[in-house]
Image (spheres, rainbow, N blue to C red):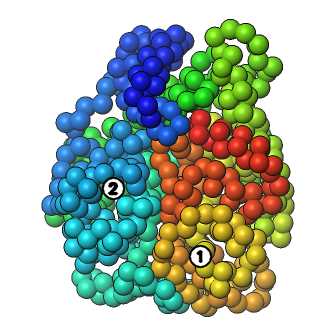
Amino acid sequence: MNPMRFTRARKALAASIAAFIVAPGYADPAHLRASIVVAPDPHGLMGTLKIDGPIDRSGPFFQSLGTNGRSCATCHDPEEAMSFTPAHADMIFATSRGKDPLFASVDGANCDSVAARDRAGHSLILQNGLLRIALPVPPNAEFSISVVSDPYGCALRIDPKTHVLTVSVYRRPLPATNLSFLSAVMSDGRETIAPLTNGASYSANLRADLTQQAIDATTGHAQATSAPTPGQADGIVDFELALYTAQLWDHRAGPLDGRGTSGGPIHLAAQSYYPGINDTLGQDPNGIPFDPGAMTLYGSWAQTPSVSGPDIENRGARARIAAGELLFDTAPLTITHVRGLNDNPALGQPASFKGTCTTCHDAPNVGNHSLPLPLDIGTSHTGNPSFESDPVIASAVSQLSMPNLPVFLISGCPDPFSPGQSTSFYTTDPARALITGHCSDFNRVKGPILRGLAARAPYFHNGAAATLREVVSFYDQRFQMGLTKAQKEELAAFLNSL
């Protein structure tokens, strides 16, 4: 981003925040400004708000509590929308010659045997922002697993410490922000030790889950020899739960948080949420039926813009964002062969049905699912056409910049879309099946919170989409949306405004 443009945007941003109607719990706009970390991204400015005051970088979230020099902030940087990008990793690798704690061999390299300065051996974190996650094959597994492509030499092996068959999968670190909207912790839900499905227990269970996640991250990613103290774990969780991250400023549209719109982290912090809100499957605890119009941030920009005044240069970009939001809420999708939906008894196991983006992204103005509903939409499938039998999925995956990942052959599972028949298939990440051992959970990952997308490319759990334009092209093919070029640009503009 041009430095002069960044400076002008910062000044305009400050004026925009100062003009806000202050959300409940805040004393004055100056307090808000002091509590937001503003950082440039390819499309404008991202803001991370800490609702109880400015970010204090001396707390346990920023402390090295393990043996390899890592802190939580190593992979969850406030300047990087509480995750990190490949560009960030590449810069750190160059300046540290690969010795920064981010590249600790436990998961910061393609395999744990890679030397620190070996750039090729760190290709997945440098090119796709991926960490290696080593997960054991469950002892109760209903399937057998073998490896058919192992580009790095550690895809499937007996762990030398645990003596258990272990699978290496490669995933993006989820942002440690906006956590008060979670319905599951981690992409595969493995840290959801207490369910996040009941409003009465939600806060307590969320704290319990995030505490366990902090403990496991410290003993795992940071290789601590002992768990963090209760005070340290509480400090990490308190910090995380106070954070809200969203796009504040768009290069073309200007401020996203004023003039009748409700973008940005301050509005997000005031967003209503409870488990099951606007649930697609009719499980809203208040009995409120599902409303596909779940995104309502930029409706005011859909009005015919004024032909004069200070906003004349922004009106086209704002109209595109509003049009993209409308597409997100209303553009029809044809949903087929999605594990978690088309094999779902609650839906009658339909071979095909119509939906919209909000069928899976139903939490209002947040974008995840308000009850746990991990899905297999095809992103764990391989880009190698010889390993993909579904032409629709193959066409969708061809739209992506798929990283070179190991490919596994899964055998012994019933075919969820052909009752009474068994099936074998290929995958780059078995996902939730490595947690439960169930065939029905293969490739299923949660839909992430969509706020703050512009700052954290690449996308999907495996970094397969280099841009949000690729994300849109994937969905257009995968769910036969039939979008025009202009509509793809509108939908991408909306996603970049979140």
Helix, strand or loop at mark 1:
loop
Real-space Cα separation, disc 1 to disc 2, in angstroms: 25 Å
Whole-percent x, y for residue 262 in the image = 61, 25
Quarter of the picture containing the N terminus is top left
Residue wearing tag 1:
382
Q: Amino acid at mark 2?
A: Asp
Whole-percent x, y for residue 260 in the image = 66, 18
Helix, strand or loop at mark 2:
helix
Residue at 66% in and 44% down: 492
Task: Give the label, 1 or 2, closer to the camera.
Answer: 2
> Which badge, 1 or 2, is on the more N-terminal residue?
2
Question: In the image shown, does 109 or 48 lie closer to the viewer?
Answer: 109
Residue wearing tag 2:
90
Residue at 26% in and 44% down: 61
Residue at 31% in and 58% down: 217
Is 458 placed left or right of 121 in the picture? right
Whole-percent x, y for residue 432 in the image = 53, 70
Up the image or down, 188 lies above or below 437; here it is above
Q: Amino acid at mark 1?
A: Thr
Is 100 placed left or right of 343 in the picture? left
Quarter of the picture containing the C terminus is top right
Q: Residues within 10 Å of mark 1 (few under 14, many from 20)?
A: many
